[in-house]
Image (spheres, helix red, strand yellow):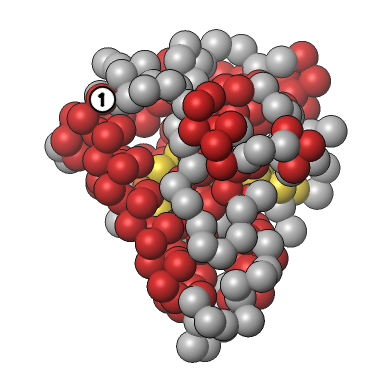
Amino acid sequence: MRSPHIQRSICPEPGDFHSDVSLAPSWISTAMLENMRFPYELPALPYALDELSPFISENTLRFHHGRHHQAYIDALNQAIDDTEFEAMPLRALIRATAAKTGHAAVFNNAAQAWNHAFYWDSLRPPGGGEPPPVLRQMIEASFGSVAACKEALTDAAVTQFGTGWAWLVLEDGRIRVMKTGEADNPLTRAAIPLLAIDVWEHAYYLDYQNRRKDHVAGVVDHLLNWDFAASHLA
Ligand SMILES: [Fe+2]
């Protein structure tokens, strides 16, 4: 099943998309989710289930998107039902509940709902390769080379202890690599997220078992959507 049919059904007006995300169909899961309000629905994948294979299998993507991401959406709806968070935009909701006593369930599920949409957009078939010129220049200024940036991102993803995420972000005018635990993400800091890599075991265990490093290598070398990352620099 291709996503455009679902995209149109959930987002009736293209102008409703978030202003800092391109309308290109390969990276709109985040925009779809951010334009929703309670009750949230699972945003469509920007590619077919089998298009990330062999680096991420159809089976992994079906469970990861259809079960895990759906579960975060469902739990978010349950957590904010009949609360002041119903009408709040998702990014604002995440920032408002981060590290706030009594709001852990709302934050964890809101953040995971957003993290996964951002992660789907961070991948594309075929991905990898070289970043667009503007992003490449910023990466070279920050890391010395694209290869060094990829190495730092890979290291963050491989070394994140337990569940969590590796991120490429723009912070203080420089491209940086960040890793966060569990549901935490760069939106809780003064950083603009550019790319996400999910290193929860459910992201790779069906395909790679405990070999997270092999999974991350496949993602970084073959699936990263550098155009999506560059779209956040404007
Ligand atoms: Fe995940």
Q: Residue at x 27, y 35 (%)?
A: 62
The N terminus - image quarter: top left
When asked about the image quadrant of residue 142, the answer is top right
Label 1: few (<14), some or many (≥20) within 10 Å?
Answer: some
Image height of 35 relative to 149, above or below: below
Q: In the visual, does 92 lie left or right of 49?
A: right
Image height of 144 relative to 40, above or below: above
Task: Say what amino acid the circle numbered 1 marks.
Answer: Glu
Can residue 232 be seen here? The reply is no
The residue at the far bottom in this view is 102
Can residue 115 be seen here? The reply is yes
Q: Secondary structure at mark 1?
A: helix
Q: Residue at x 33, y 57 (%)?
A: 71
Image height of 189 relative to 16, above or below: below
When asked about the image quadrant of residue 177, the answer is top right
Residue 93 or 218: which is nearer the viewer? Answer: 93
The x, y position of residue 132, in whole percent, is 71, 15
The C terminus - image quarter: top right
The x, y position of residue 65, in whole percent, is 35, 41
Q: Residue at x 25, y 24 (%)?
A: 57
Residue 15 or 230: which is nearer the viewer? Answer: 15
Which residue is denoted by mark 1 in the rendering? 58
The x, y position of residue 227, in whole percent, is 66, 21
